[in-house]
């Protein structure tokens, strides 16, 4: 059986995770064929060479490896700059930097490119889930969607929006509310750290009606996300307590595995809950 040929944009925490698991045969129907790096000095180059995986620094060269799907594990800019062209060329696209979709026109651009190329845009759940249940409820009508995110205090260090608050994250004694408001505003303040809010907004009632709360919390061990929605089907509350990736606490193990799940569904003859 022909394997699904997977190319990856970026070789950071998630990119390397996906690469290694595909190379090790964790998703039997897939094989990694090449990785895009922004420059020869990009992190991950030595790792790629140790695994004998080709790397390139242009999209054209990446597409020259004839991938069936490209996984973006790079930046929001990469989603905007490369996503439409990838889809237009008939290659499926899995973006992980979902905060890029705060741009109101990007989804329409991506959809049009996919229709032109006969490809598909796949939106992964990332560090959360239950998006299939939310989309089911959406058919009947959903009135309200909220998500409350709590991460350990120092996880928020180095983020400009938090630095502007002048908070001493090292010595925080109790949970501190960093943000409350529409997902669209949240994406602009926390673009790399709250991509799950984008996934929730895309799956549900949109960036302007989805309400996000963010806490720096010295009492939590896990990256915690509580999602609630209500509508014609009733009320739902879902709680995720995710294990952070040791190398990068801003990323969760669940988010890494979510990408593999999308690829698994693309290769399997049976799809459950998606």
Image: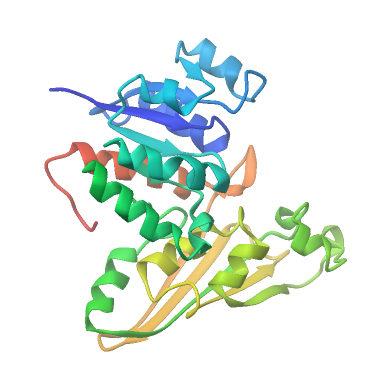
- Scheme of colours in the image: rainbow
Residue 38: horizontal and vertical position, in percent?
59, 28
Q: Quadrant of residue 31?
A: top left
Q: How many marks?
A: 0
Between 240 and 77, the one nearer to me in the picture: 77
Between 78 and 96, the one nearer to me in the picture: 78
Residue 43: horizontal and vertical position, in percent?
64, 25
For residue 123, say whether it is visible.
no
Residue 269: horizontal and vertical position, in percent?
11, 41
Quadrant of the snapshot with the C terminus: bottom left
Left or right: where 153 falls relative to 267: right
Q: Is residue 231 above or below residue 164?
A: below
Residue 219: horizontal and vertical position, in percent?
69, 65
Give the residue drawn at x 50%, y 39%. Answer: 73
Between 2 and 236, the one nearer to me in the picture: 2
Q: Is residue 189 above or below residue 81?
A: below
Q: Quadrant of residue 170?
A: bottom right
Give the residue drawn at x 23%, y 58%. Answer: 273
Quadrant of the snapshot with the N terminus: top left
Give the residue drawn at x 43%, y 73%. Answer: 206
Give the residue drawn at x 51%, y 62%. Answer: 103
For residue 174, say whether it is visible.
yes
């Amino acid at each position: 059986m022909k394997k699904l040929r997977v190319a990856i944009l970026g070789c950071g925490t998630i990119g390397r995770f996906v690469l290694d698991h595909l190379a090790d045969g964790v998703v039997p129907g897939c094989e990694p064929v090449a990785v895009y790096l922004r420059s020869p000095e990009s992190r991950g180059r030595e790792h790629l060479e140790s695994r004998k995986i080709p790397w390139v620094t242009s999209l054209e060269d990446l597409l020259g490896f004839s991938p069936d799907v490209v996984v973006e594990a790079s930046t929001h800019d990469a989603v905007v700059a490369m996503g439409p062209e990838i889809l237009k060329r008939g290659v499926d696209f899995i973006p992980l930097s979902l905060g890029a979709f705060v741009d109101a026109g990007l989804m329409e651009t991506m959809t049009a490119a996919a229709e032109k190329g006969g490809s598909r845009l796949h939106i992964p759940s990332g560090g959360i889930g239950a998006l299939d249940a939310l989309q089911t409820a959406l058919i009947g009508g959903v009135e309200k969607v909220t998500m409350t995110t709590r991460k350990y205090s120092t996880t928020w260090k180095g983020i400009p929006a938090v630095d502007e608050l002048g908070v001493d994250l090292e010595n925080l004694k109790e949970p501190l509310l960093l943000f409350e408001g529409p997902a669209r505003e949240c994406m602009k303040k926390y673009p790399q750290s709250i991509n799950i809010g984008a996934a929730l907004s895309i799956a549900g009632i949109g960036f302007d009606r989805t309400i996000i709360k963010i806490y720096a919390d010295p009492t939590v061990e896990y990256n915690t996300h509580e999602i609630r929605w209500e509508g014609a089907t009733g009320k739902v509350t879902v709680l995720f307590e995710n294990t952070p990736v040791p190398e990068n606490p801003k990323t969760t193990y669940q988010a890494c595995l979510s990408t593999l799940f999308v690829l698994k569904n693309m290769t399997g003859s049976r799809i459950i809950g998606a």
